[in-house]
Image (cartoon, grey):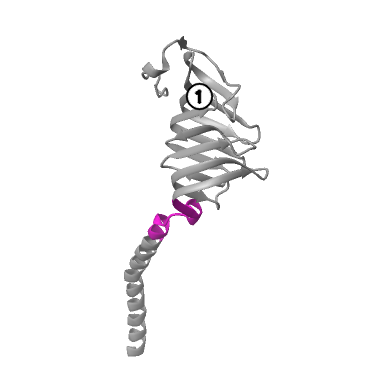
């Protein structure tokens, strides 16, 4: 009887110990799961970052532009590899003789490697060889089609005045350009030019 009593006591003790430890075990596991969830996915992190970058970009074996940026983040492990320029960018376009034909500056830019496509946003300004200036909040440049386009409001300033509209197409050197949904043509002296105020939310001027 004493032996049986001891066995029953030991079994009860194990059950009691298990009942006490089980919640602690799950609590510990929960903490580990929360820690794992809080760790960022390495795939979503930049595979390379650089500061004060100055580089030349080539297409079909020819240097076609010069890029200057304060910060560059390369994401090469994601499904759609891209390079981000979050703190401003300046791009100079070259012709076949390495002569600058135009430039573009913006607050931010993204380059999608597979698509060979650029996106520039925030105070975007461009100027072609003829001195025509383009201002908008967003531009796309497709290297395959060698076309630059935008569906946002845009302002074009040249020696003849200012044209304001929505929607824009041009060659990558900002020639043969066309504005859609023209809002107005203003004949002014470019030296006396002042920003135009509108009520459009996505219009930078």
170 relative to 115, above or below: above
Count of marks, rendered view:
1
Residue 185 coordinates in the image, percent (x, y): 47, 10
Is residue 198 at least partly visible in the picture? no
- In this view, the residue in front, 145 or 3, is 145
Secondary structure under badge 1? Answer: loop
Question: Could you tell me which residue is drawn at 41 percent across and 42 percent down?
Answer: 87
* In this rendering, position of residue 59 left or right of residue 133: right
Q: Nearer the viewer, residue 105 or 99?
A: 99
Along the line of sight, the residue nearer the viewer: 54 or 118: 54
Mark 1 burial class by Cα count in 10 Å: few <14, some 14-19, many 20+? few
Identify which residue is drawn at 43% across, 54% down. 40
In the image shown, does 4 or 24 lie closer to the viewer?
24
Q: Quadrant of residue 59?
A: top right
Q: Is residue 45 magenta?
A: yes
Residue 143 location (% of width, % of height): 62, 36
Is residue 146 depicted above or below 151 in this figure?
below
Pinpoint residue 39: horizontal percent, then vertical percent: 41, 57
Q: Quadrant of residue 27?
A: bottom left
Query: Image check: 120 left or right of 172?
Result: left
- In the image, 126: left or right of 195? right
Report the residue at 58% width, 21% height from top: 177
Question: Which residue position holds label 1?
Answer: 131
Quarter that holds the N terminus: bottom left
Q: Is residue 27 visible?
A: yes
Q: Determine if the magenta segment contains residue 107.
A: no
The residue at 39%/18% (across/down) is 191
Q: Quadrant of the C terminus?
A: top left
Q: Which residues are magenta?
A: 33-51
73 lies above or below 11: above
Residue extending farthest right: 60
């Amino acid at each position: 009887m004493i032996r049986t009593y001891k066995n029953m006591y030991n079994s009860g003790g194990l059950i009691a110990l298990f009942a006490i430890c089980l919640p602690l075990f799950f609590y510990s596991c929960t903490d580990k799961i929360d820690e794992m969830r809080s760790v960022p996915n390495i795939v979503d992190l930049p595979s390379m970052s650089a500061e004060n970058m100055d580089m030349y970009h080539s297409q079909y074996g020819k240097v076609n532009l010069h890029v200057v940026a304060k910060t560059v983040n390369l994401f090469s492990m994601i499904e759609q590899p891209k390079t981000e320029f979050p703190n401003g960018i300046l791009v100079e376009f070259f012709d076949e003789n390495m002569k600058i034909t135009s430039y573009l500056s913006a607050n931010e830019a993204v380059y999608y490697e597979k698509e060979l496509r650029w996106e520039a946003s925030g105070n975007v300004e461009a100027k072609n060889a003829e001195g025509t200036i383009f201002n908008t909040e967003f531009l796309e440049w497709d290297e395959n089609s060698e076309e630059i386009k935008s569906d946002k409001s845009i302002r074009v300033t040249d020696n003849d005045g200012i044209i304001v509209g929505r929607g824009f197409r041009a060659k990558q050197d900002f020639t043969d350009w066309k504005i859609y949904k023209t809002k107005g043509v203003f004949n002014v002296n470019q030296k006396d030019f002042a920003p135009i105020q509108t009520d459009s939310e996505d219009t930078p001027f």
